[in-house]
Image (tube, rainbow, N blue to C red):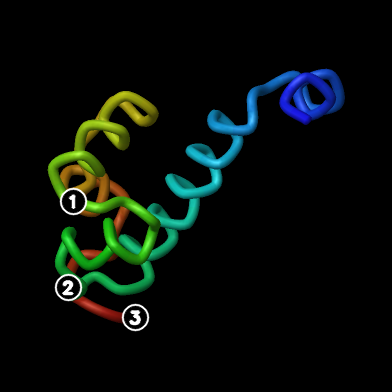
């Protein structure tokens, strides 16, 4: 299955799942600014906030907290 998936998508199943989880977490970080990072991690399928931070940093080059600060809406909901 893995070989067929990679042939069709040019990525591994694990890399695809990781990309989807990080995308979901980015959406949550911005749409729910009061939600703690550890809850975003759990909701995105990561067992711990520290592992989530590590993977997020590897994928995005920025921590989840810094991502939220950089791309979030300061001053609350608009």
Q: Secondary structure at mark 1?
A: loop
User: Measured from the top left, where is residue 53 in percent x and y?
Assistant: 20, 40
Give left or right: position of 62 versus 21: left
Give left or right: position of 53 versus 31: left
Q: Which residue is mark 1?
A: 48
Mark 1 crowdedness (10 Å alpha carbons): few <14, some 14-19, many ≥20: some
User: Measured from the top left, where is residue 68 in percent x and y?
Assistant: 24, 53
Q: Nearer the viewer, residue 9 or 77?
A: 9
Mark 2 crowdedness (10 Å alpha carbons): few <14, some 14-19, many ≥20: few
Vertical placement of 64 versus 3: above or below?
below
**Which residue sits at x=38%, y=71%?**
31
Q: Say which of marks 3 and 1 sits in front.
A: 1
**Which residue sits at x=21%, y=77%?**
76
- Quarter of image, res 63: top left
**Which residue sits at x=30%, y=33%?**
55
Q: Which mark is residue 75?
A: 2
- Quarter of image, res 72: bottom left
Q: Which mark is residue 76?
A: none
Contact between marks 2 and 1 (CB within 8 A): the answer is no
Q: Nearer the viewer, residue 17 or 24?
A: 17
Quadrant housing the N terminus: top right
Q: Which residue is mark 3?
A: 78
- Quarter of image, res 51: top left
| Distance (Cα) linking label 2 and label 3 | 8 Å
């Amino acid at each position: 299955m893995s070989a067929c998936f990679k042939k069709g998508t040019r990525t591994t199943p694990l890399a695809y799942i990781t990309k989807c989880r990080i995308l979901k977490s980015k959406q949550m970080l911005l749409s729910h600014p009061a939600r703690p990072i550890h809850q975003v991690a759990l909701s995105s399928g990561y067992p711990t906030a520290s592992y989530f931070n590590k993977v997020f940093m590897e994928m995005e080059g920025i921590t989840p907290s810094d991502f939220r600060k950089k791309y979030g809406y300061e001053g609350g909901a608009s």
